Image (tube, rainbow, N blue to C red):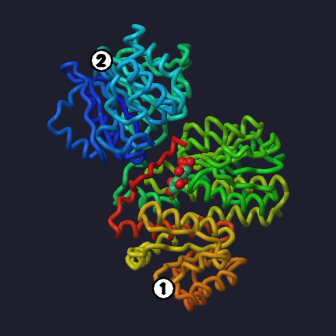
Amino acid sequence: MCGIVGYIGTKQAYPILIKGLRRLEYRGYDSAGVAMIGQSGSLNVYKTKGKVDNLTDYCTDKDISGCIGIAHTRWATHGEPSARNAHPHYSQSHNLAIIHNGIIENYADIKSRLQEKGVTFASDTDTEVLVQLVEYIMSSKNLTLLEAVQTALYQVIGAYAIAILDKRDPHQIIAARKQSPLVVGIGEGEFFLGSDASPIIEYTDKVVYLEDGNIAVIRLGEELKVMSIHGEEQALQVKKVDIDLGQIEKGGYPHFMLKEIFEQPECLTNCMRGRINVEGNQVTLSAMIDHHQKLLKAKRIVIVACGTSWHAGLIGKQLIESLCRIPCEVEYASEFRYRNPVVTKDDVVIAISQSGETADTLAAIQLAKERGAFIYGICNAIGSSIPRATDTGTYIHVGPEIGVASTKAFTGQVTVLSMLALCLADKLGTITKEEYQLMVSELTRIPKKMERALQANEQIKHLAMIFTYAKNCLYLGRGYNYPVALEGALKLKEISYIHAEGYPAAEMKHGPIALIDSEMPVFVIATRDRLYEKVISNIQEVRARGGRVTALVTAGDELISQYADHVIELPDTLECFQPLIASIPLQLLAYHIAVCKGKDVDRPRNLAKSVTVE
Ligand code: F6R
């Protein structure tokens, strides 16, 4: 949610800031803005509603000089998307400018106190309250910017990543974080700031991830200083980021989403590299080596996650219960955190998150930790907040995911869950050696099978045209394929804005069947597995009511084509790994339908990639 960029050095800041905003636009894109201290010493703030292109058009005839600046791309929480509510926000005197990601929960209270003192406000945002508070403290108590920020942050309830400029001190940026990510890049005589490392990696691979409650004093010509809110200096933990630029560019594809769908075979190979041996018969996860006692003794596993990661969790539950015989529950993190759930020290809580920053998942981890559970993270973004809050975990290593609709992270999460379940089952002896080896070696064949599934792209592109005008769609699956149906429906909703529902195929007759008529496309995952015959019956129930069926079938299946209007063939695999293959045509289908409808696939309306507010 919201992207933050900053630069201080000897180069012109504007091009660096704009490039950074473009890299971070996936985090929010309802307005964008930039603040720079220009050559003349003025603090210039420019901001517009809409995407970064609108901002650059607006800035064509403006003074964009200056070697220090901050910039922001917004996902609105308080105040409608508009230029007025876009960041940066000036303080009343226009001496200060702030950008902010997060929510100041007690902003209304602070605002009315400041209004009583005569402060006037120019926007409806919670962010402006913070910069006005800092200015009020600076002038009324005669404090420096750093001291005023420290004092102000004491009074603030909520989450924030902020950066502030003061035109009277044109060699300094003050930044701070609490529950919203912030990274400082250290270059040669220059510093960068980002909500994540993507706007920074082009210039330096040396970064410092700020911890909660940290304030960074970034001064030109001096060493980076990081301190706590109380002013205690913190030891600098400089890390090396290992992302190459190609990973965050489109590489010839029209959209990040399509690139990320096609990358999946390679991503899964990377995910398994060093974890499955070359013979393809043994999985080793370092988390299992270091913490096997805790994991093997788990009386229960609780998976917490949101959205697509929650769907991966539903597959994880089936893997863990059927292979390891450990009871496993899957919870929406946002519900779990407020439900007073029963969690004990005998539980292992698995938190799944692509971004590693989802506020609800972080809060769920906190709650589970307080109750003594052992926390295992499955994340993609290296060094993000969730891996740092967990006891152990496994990165999915699928590379940066930029498309707002999650694709490769989903299959990466399912792959890690598969490896984890296999490791546990092997150690617990709940599957035989033969079963274990068969499954491990099949997992290594999945990338090749994904490549075959991707060959259906042209067929799916044509099919997509038929469904472009649908108002509603139904996705049906059973067993391991039920979460795939949920995920397929979510992908379509997110990027094409067509209403879609995923349902367990047999549940349909308990209600949703009433919706079925010739206008309703129904996508059924009907691969050859234990429930194959049952799913055929479900297809017939749909057909009998005039529904139009598109079936995802195992290659060579000739039976289902008798009942379905369209079939998409998938390579055969073990039932438990079918989601890794079956999700691909559904991702492609959502993508092509959205493209046919002319939607902005990588930046769907109202969404943001990283949900750092609750
Ligand atoms: C859907 C999607 C979201 C995320 C959800 C959780 O395509 O991307 O539903 O899965 O916001 O995000 P993470 O995995 O970053 O915690």
Residue that lies at the very extreme toward the top in this rendered image: 142
**Which residue does the numbered mark 1 point to in the structure image?**
518
Report x, y in % for residue 184.
44, 28
Judge depth for marks 1 and 2 and give the one in front: 1
Q: Is residue 269 visible?
A: no
Question: Mark 1 falls on what kind of element?
Answer: loop
- The answer to whether the beta carbon of the residue marked 1 is less than 8 Å from any atom of ligand 1 is no
In-front residue for pair 222/331: 331
Report x, y in % for residue 177.
50, 28
**Which residue does the numbered mark 2 point to in the structure image?**
170
Please give left or right for residue 583 compared with residue 255 in the image.
right
Please give left or right for residue 265 compared with residue 315 in the image.
left
Report x, y in % for residue 5.
37, 34
Q: Amino acid at mark 2?
A: Pro
Please give left or right for residue 493 compared with residue 595 in the image.
right
Q: Residue at x 61, y 88 (%)?
A: 540
CB under 8 Å between discs 1 and 2:
no
Q: Residue at x 65, y 56 (%)?
A: 313
For residue 392, the mark is: none
Q: Residue at x 53, y 19 (%)?
A: 229
Residue that lies at the very extreme toward the front in this rendered image: 116
Question: Mark 2 falls on what kind of element?
Answer: loop
Quick one: label 2, few (<14), some, or many (20+) residues within 10 Å? many
Please give left or right for residue 579 compared with residue 183 in the image.
right
Q: Quadrant of the C terminus?
A: top right
Q: Is residue 205 visible?
A: yes
Q: Quadrant of the N terminus?
A: top left
Residue that lies at the very extreme toward the left in this rendered image: 61
